[in-house]
Image (cartoon, helix red, strand yellow):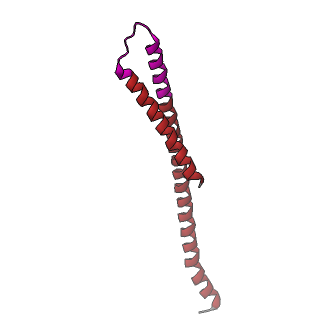
Amino acid sequence: MDPMALIVAMSIPSAFTGFCFWMLQKHLEKREKRQDEKEAAREKNEILMVKSIGAAIALGEATAEAVSRIPDAHCNGDMHAALEYARKIKHEQKDFFVEQSVHEIY
């Protein structure tokens, strides 16, 4: 076998293998990009959920405070207990986020 035929015979499988690895790498890059996009969307969704929960608690607190100021409204202990519970949960959530942010920093 002459050297040129040997070089050609060795380079064809190497080129094919290189091409296959290149295709595989491109496929993995596309998959990783899609995964990153999904992760960003999930993170944004969670942020919006937390904000929505905060808004709902704020609205509930404002409503309970307004109703308790009406002289003819006979507020029972349930509303006051619910208001205290909402405030307690709001503070627990805030404390949790502070704790998580400290863990993320360190």
The quadrant in which residue 76 appears is top left
Q: Measured from the top left, where is residue 30 in percent x and y?
A: 55, 55
Q: Residue placed at 54% from the left, 69% from the top?
A: 20
Q: Quadrant of residue 70?
A: top left
Magenta residues? 55-79
Task: Residue 45: tell me if it is visible.
Answer: no
In the image, residue 66 lies in the stretch drawn in magenta: yes
The relative height of residue 4 versus residue 39 in the rendered view (above or below) is: below
Depth check: give the residue in front, 40 or 69: 69
- Looking at the rendered structure, the number of numbered marks drawn on it comes to 0
Q: Position of residue 77 (x, y in %)?
A: 35, 21
Horizontal side of 9 relative to 93 (left or right) equals right
The quadrant of the rendering that contains the N terminus is: bottom right
Q: Residue at x 52, y 33 (%)?
A: 51
- The location of residue 73, given as percent across then percent down, is 39, 10
Percent coordinates x, y for residue 93 in the rendering: 48, 38
Q: Main secondary structure of the magenta part?
A: helix
Is residue 58 on the magenta stretch? yes
The residue under the point 60% across, 87% down is 6
Residue furthest toward the right?
4
Q: Visible in this render: residue 96? A: yes
Q: Viewer-proximal residue, 19 or 105?
A: 105
In the rendered image of this protein, does residue 61 appear above or below residue 72? below
- Residue at the limit of the structure toward the top, as seen here: 72
In the foreground, 71 or 32: 71
The residue depicted at 40 percent of the width and 22 percent of the height is 80
